[in-house]
Image (cartoon, rainbow, N blue to C red):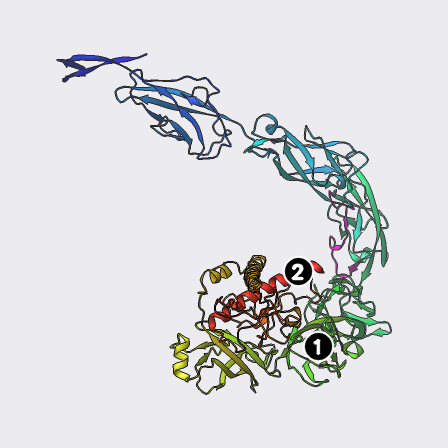
């Protein structure tokens, strides 16, 4: 524990190599702060023996410095690194939280030295700690000796080791162990030891240079897996080993260009080169050198170079005793040790000839010939010999006088001549070199010049022959369309058999191979036909195209030659829409109820498929009465009152009428050419959207409009109350009359006729014979229909009106009139009775206000919902 004393009024005198503190007054002792040492497995303290995984994400809070000051002063924390070191961490001075700011890599640095400090403002304590970086499986195995190329003899035994693959994983633990595998190991000739990496030839397998000269083996090195970012991870690498198979000496040499013919001219000198034989080792992968020698027939007048195969004359031509020499020439392989191995023998014919007095001459089957013709099919295989040409070239001179070159002059490099150098005589062979260029469609015939020119003679004698090749056509081309696809347009309602589009395909082949037949197929081809010869596509005679039913068709057209070679093109047909449908309303007579301030919408439908044929414009053609107080949206068909009409009073002032029903003639016209239109009569009843002001009853009805049973109970209660009141009044009257002895006989009791307009109170709990009759009220007039879907009492949405079967739902009845007041002075003659039939007070039709209309609609809606529920219950 370090400590120091606080000093007040300290003066410092600077002297050489000395600081003198003068006039120091010591106040009180101050002890330095210190860290808590919580051990190596704690995440707070002084970082002592702290370890951290290298896959920790940057930005992670890894530790919290924790310390204290003996005097209880607030402490601050610090963190620093040695100069030149990378700063991996940062610390919050107040909280001591240490955050990782740089990515860790154990393979580059497995420990980090950090200087942590704590200070209370007066003194500062610094400690050096080491943070150990722990390994994570983040490194792939790395090959040390691959990719590589090795050579292996084809005679290497099965099971032999041919290479040792080495890979290193810099991770530790299981992540640093390496296991080796072969990619596609089942299909290769090789196997690898999983642990040592030794590559061997599989048991029972051998290498064969003649089958495969090079093998490519892909080796996979995989680690043992380990934790990375909280998950188990396995990493692997791959590399390719190229194995070149070395040919073994198991094939004898062979001579090239046999048979051999050599010539000795009478002008030849001693030592002249007569001929050169060439042989090559049959083991072309690793050929041995060749040694040439004579077996017999040289008579001692010729010699051969052992390495080059060049044969020379050892004497003058005049001393030669024979005109023709048949010499057996041997070509032997020479092993690296110089030992002669396999050999081959051929015959060299040497003829003694005279001076150069004959030019080269071309011969056919019947003697000298300078014109050769051949007919053959186009595109013969490359390398094929034109066997129909029987050409021989000969120079009757001997020796160098009979040596000449052959050249073929003509279009391109379709053909080549073999041999190119001839001594005395040779069979001329013409080979195909460019098969693709020999195309009948480009050249019906080919003309070449075959030229033979002497090489080493002063005279340079030469000869030419014409070669004419007539190419015969083959069916090597498929028909080809002028386009990969065709786009056609045809108006709808076109008559059957109308032309749609004409397709064209050409086949450059001749004869029947060039004739093209057309056909169509596909899911969209049912309404169409095609003329097989001309390619004209037309509609079926019975076909009727309708853009409203289907406007797009696509199908394939096939062009085929006589042997079945074909090509395809796609045809896209668009049926053009014509304006052949007028707009149509759901009904030519429409009834609407308009609430002031809300629109009424009418709608017409045009069945045409495209714009502008199916775009509809609306207009009001006529209004009855004449005063037109409406506007219509030309695009949507919404009918609204003119903007200045805000109430029914304004309408009445304008029209001077009390009837608020209008009949409008509305026209719906499409925008097609020609344009079609239709009209409908719209009957509009105008009303105001007012709130119920019928006192408590109106409020109750509005609040309970979605509860029909509650309203029904209220109505039953009111009726029961009325019946009870009637019974009480009738009983009181009866008792009074009884006391006054004015009760009339029974026979004088009169019944009211049924034809009077009475209220029929039926038991709502008794199932009626006809559904919908239990709330039926007999009145003089009925409203034809009630729209129950529009909560604003506006029936401008025509597609939600519910039509019920007759009889229509009843209107809400008005309340019955109160009973007549009791007047004592009047004599009551009629015997009071208890009856469920109450006579109306007057036959005069009551005046129904707008408020009553709204109330009726609401009550009717509630009754209809109740009736619907009961009908569903009985079903």
The image shows residue 686, relative to residue 833, as above or below, that is below
Q: How crowded is mark 1: few (under 14 residues within 10 Å), some or many (20 or more)?
A: many
Q: Quadrant of the C terminus?
A: bottom right
Residue found at the very far front of the displayed protein = 741
* Mark 1 or mark 2, whichever is nearer to me: 2
Location of mark 2 (residue): 870
Q: Position of residue 304 (x, y in %)?
A: 77, 48
In the image, taking residue 622 as reference, residue 274 lies left or right, namely right
Relative depth, front residue between 42 and 214: 42
Find out whether residue 281 is within the magenta segment. Answer: yes
Relative depth, front residue between 178 and 116: 116
The prevailing secondary structure element of the residues shown in magenta is loop
Q: How crowded is mark 2: few (under 14 residues within 10 Å), some or many (20 or more)?
A: some
Q: Identify which residue is drawn at 67% across, 71% down.
A: 747
Whichever of callouts 1 and 2 sits on the residue coming sooner in the sequence is 1
Whether residue 477 is visible here, answered yes or no, is: no
Dot 2: element: helix
Asked where in the image residue 767 lies, by quadrant, the reply is bottom right
Question: In the drawing, what numbered circle is on residue 505?
Answer: 1
| Stretch of the chain drawn in magenta | 263-287
Whether residue 831 is visible here, answered yes or no, is: yes
Q: Position of residue 739 (x, y in %)?
A: 56, 62
Q: Identify which residue is drawn at 31% across, 15% down.
A: 70
The CA span between labels 1 and 2 is 75 Å
């Amino acid at each position: 524990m370090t400590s120091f004393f606080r000093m007040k009024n300290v003066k410092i005198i600077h002297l050489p190599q000395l600081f003198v503190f003068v006039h120091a007054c010591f106040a009180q002792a101050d002890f330095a702060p210190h860290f808590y040492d919580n051990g190596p497995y704690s995440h707070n303290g002084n970082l002592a023996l702290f370890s951290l995984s290298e896959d920790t994400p940057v930005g992670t809070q890894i530790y919290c410095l924790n310390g204290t000051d003996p005097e209880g002063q607030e402490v601050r924390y610090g963190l620093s690194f040695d100069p030149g070191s990378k700063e991996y961490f940062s610390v919050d001075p107040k909280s001591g939280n240490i955050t990782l700011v740089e990515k860790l890599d154990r393979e580059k640095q497995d420990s980090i030295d950090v200087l942590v400090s704590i200070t209370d403002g007066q003194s500062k304590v610094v400690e050096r700690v080491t943070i150990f970086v722990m390994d994570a499986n983040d490194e792939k195995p790395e090959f040390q000796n691959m990719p590589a190329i090795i050579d292996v003899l084809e005679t290497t035994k099965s099971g032999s080791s041919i290479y040792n693959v080495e890979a290193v994983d810099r991770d530790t633990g299981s992540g640093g162990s390496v296991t080796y595998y072969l990619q596609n190991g089942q299909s290769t000739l090789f196997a690898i030891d999983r642990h040592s990496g030794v590559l061997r030839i599989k048991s029972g397998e051998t290498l064969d240079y003649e089958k495969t000269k090079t093998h490519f083996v892909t080796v996979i090195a995989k680690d043992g897996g380990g934790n990375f970012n909280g998950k188990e991870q396995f990493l692997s690498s791959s590399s390719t080993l190229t194995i070149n198979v070395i040919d073994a000496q198991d094939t004898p040499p062979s001579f090239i260009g046999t048979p051999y013919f050599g010539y000795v001219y009478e002008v030849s000198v001693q030592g002249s080169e007569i001929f050169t034989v060439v042989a090559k080792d049959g083991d072309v992968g690793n050929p041995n050198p060749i040694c040439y020698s004579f077996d017999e027939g040289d008579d001692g007048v010729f010699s051969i170079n052992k390495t080059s195969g060049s044969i020379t004359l050892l004497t003058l031509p005049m001393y030669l005793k024979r005109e023709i020499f048949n010499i057996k020439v041997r070509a032997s392989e020479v092993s690296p040790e110089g030992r002669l191995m396999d050999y081959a023998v051929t015959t060299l014919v040497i003829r003694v000839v005279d001076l150069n007095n004959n030019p080269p001459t071309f011969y056919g089957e019947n003697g000298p010939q300078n014109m050769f013709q051949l007919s053959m099919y186009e595109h013969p295989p490359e390398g094929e010999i034109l066997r129909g040409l029987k050409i021989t070239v000969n120079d009757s001179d001997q020796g160098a006088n009979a040596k000449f070159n052959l050249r073929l002059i003509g279009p391109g490099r379709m053909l080549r001549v073999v041999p190119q150098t001839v001594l005395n005589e040779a069979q001329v062979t013409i080979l195909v070199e460019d098969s693709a260029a020999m195309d009948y469609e480009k050249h019906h015939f080919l003309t070449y010049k075959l030229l033979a020119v002497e090489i080493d003679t002063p005279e340079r004698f030469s000869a030419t022959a014409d070669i004419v090749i007539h190419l015969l056509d083959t069916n090597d081309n498929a028909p080809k369309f002028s386009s990969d696809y065709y786009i056609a347009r045809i108006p709808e309602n076109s008559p059957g058999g109308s032309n749609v589009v004409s397709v064209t395909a050409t086949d450059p082949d001749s004869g029947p191979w060039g004739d093209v037949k057309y056909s169509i197929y596909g899911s969209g081809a049912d309404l169409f036909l095609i003329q097989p010869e001309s390619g004209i596509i037309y509609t079926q005679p019975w076909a009727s195209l309708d853009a409203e039913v289907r406007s797009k068709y696509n199908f394939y057209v096939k062009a085929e030659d006589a042997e079945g070679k074909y090509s395809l093109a796609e045809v896209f047909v668009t049926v053009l829409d014509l304006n052949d449908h007028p707009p149509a309303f759901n009904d030519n007579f429409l009834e609407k109820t308009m609430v002031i301030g809300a629109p009424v919408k009418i709608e017409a439908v045009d069945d045409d498929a495209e714009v502008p044929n199916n775009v509809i414009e609306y207009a009001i053609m006529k209004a009855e009465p004449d005063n037109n107080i409406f506007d219509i949206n030309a695009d949507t068909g919404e009918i609204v009152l003119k903007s200045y009409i805000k109430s029914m009073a304004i309408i009445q002032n304008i029209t001077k009428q009390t009837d608020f029903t209008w009949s409008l003639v509305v026209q719906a016209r499409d925008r097609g050419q020609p344009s079609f239109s239709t009209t409908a009569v719209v009957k509009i009843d105008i009303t105001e959207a007012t709130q119920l002001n019928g006192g408590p009853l109106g409020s109750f009805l509005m609040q309970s409009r979605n509860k029909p049973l509650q309203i029904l109970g209220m109505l039953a209660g009111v009726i029961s109350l009325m019946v009870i009141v009637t019974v009480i009044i009738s009983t009181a009257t009866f008792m009074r009359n009884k006391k006054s002895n004015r009760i009339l006989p029974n026979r004088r009791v009169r019944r009211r006729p049924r034809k009077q307009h009475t209220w029929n109170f039926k038991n709502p709990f008794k199932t009626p014979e006809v559904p919908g009759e239990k709330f039926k009220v007999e009145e003089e007039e009925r409203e034809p229909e009630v729209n129950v879907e529009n909560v604003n009492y506006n029936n401008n949405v025509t597609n939600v009106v519910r039509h019920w079967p007759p009889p229509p739902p009843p209107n809400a009845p008005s309340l019955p009139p109160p009973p007549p007041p009791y007047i004592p002075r009047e004599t009551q003659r009629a015997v009071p009775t208890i009856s469920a039939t109450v006579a109306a007070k007057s036959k005069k039709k009551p005046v129904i206000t707008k408020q009553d209309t709204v109330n009726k609609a609401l009550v009717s809606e509630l009754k209809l919902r109740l009736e619907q529920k009961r009908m569903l219950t009985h079903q």
